[in-house]
Amino acid sequence: MKSEVDELIYSNRYFALTREELKGQARIQMSAKRFKHVLGVEAAAVRLAEQYGASIEAASIAALCHDMAKEKPDQEMKELIKETGLPSEMIDYGSNIWHGPCAAEIVKREYHLFDEDILNAIRYHTVGRSEMSLLEQVIYVADYIEAGRQFPGVEEARRLADEDLEAAVSFGTQQTLAHLIQTKKKIYPRAVATYNRWVADK
Ligand SMILES: [Fe+2]
Ligand SMILES: [Fe+2]
């Protein structure tokens, strides 16, 4: 069945790939389950971009690319972190933290995509950062609420995303941090910066 995003045609202003080619790339880089998640993020991101006035094409591209590094071997990603000069401390925090920044590097190298806003949306999709552009917020929230997500609070997150994108960023950040603390997981310092900007004193 064709969805609304399947009608989307890329303009070539960001890179030379068509949406079908990029989708094909995503499909071969990950498991079927994760690919389904990626398409869910794309659908949610395109909807949010439409609603809040971000570029639909940029939202689609960032969504299709955001988890490109998630299933890459750890060793390969550790080497990429060194080669590209990404902060080496992210190695201690595991793939949850490095897969966004690594995906941005892969996308530059493999697809020659250099739009900084799209790259930032890919880089910061997991942890966010204190200053997030509209597109960054769209991808951050879409990753959290896409139709395949099931966790306590996801309905509330979806409701907030319909009403107020920044409120959804705040909610997702708070829930994520609370979960990390409850499960005694390490917190990447930038996640605290995101929390301070988007949750504290709101
Ligand atoms: Fe991710
Ligand atoms: Fe994701």
Image: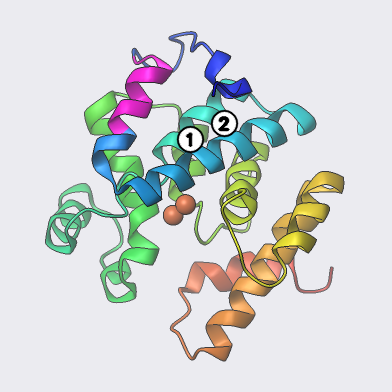
Query: Where residue 185 sits in the image (x, y, percent)?
Result: 45, 85
| Segment tinted magenta in the rendering | 17-25
Q: Does the residue labelled 1 lie within 8 Å of ligand 2?
A: no
Residue position for label 2 = 59
Quadrant hosting residue 160: bottom right
Ligand 1 quadrant in view: bottom left
Q: Which amino acid lies under the numbered mark 2 shown in the image of this protein?
A: Ala
- Closest to the observer: 126 or 79? 126
> Given contact means CB atoms under 8 Å apart, are the residues at marks 1 and 2 in contact?
yes
Query: Where residue 76 sits in the image (x, y, percent)?
Result: 13, 55
| Whether residue 107 can be seen here | no
- Closest to the observer: 92 or 37? 37
Name the residue located 47 percent from the left edge and 47 percent from the top edge: 37
38 horizontally vs 141: left or right: left
Q: Quadrant of the C terminus?
A: bottom right
Name the residue located 43 percent from the left edge and 48 percent from the top edge: 123
Query: Where residue 66 sits in the image (x, y, percent)?
Result: 43, 44
Q: In which quarter of the image is the N terminus?
A: top right
Colour option used: rainbow
The chief SS type of the magenta part is helix
Q: Is residue 186 above or below residue 190?
A: below
Q: Is residue 63 above or below residue 176?
A: above
Residue position for label 1 = 62
Q: Which secondary structure lies at badge 2?
A: helix
- Closest to the observer: 168 or 189? 168
Query: Where residue 81 sits in the image (x, y, percent)?
Result: 22, 56
Quadrant hosting residue 114: top left
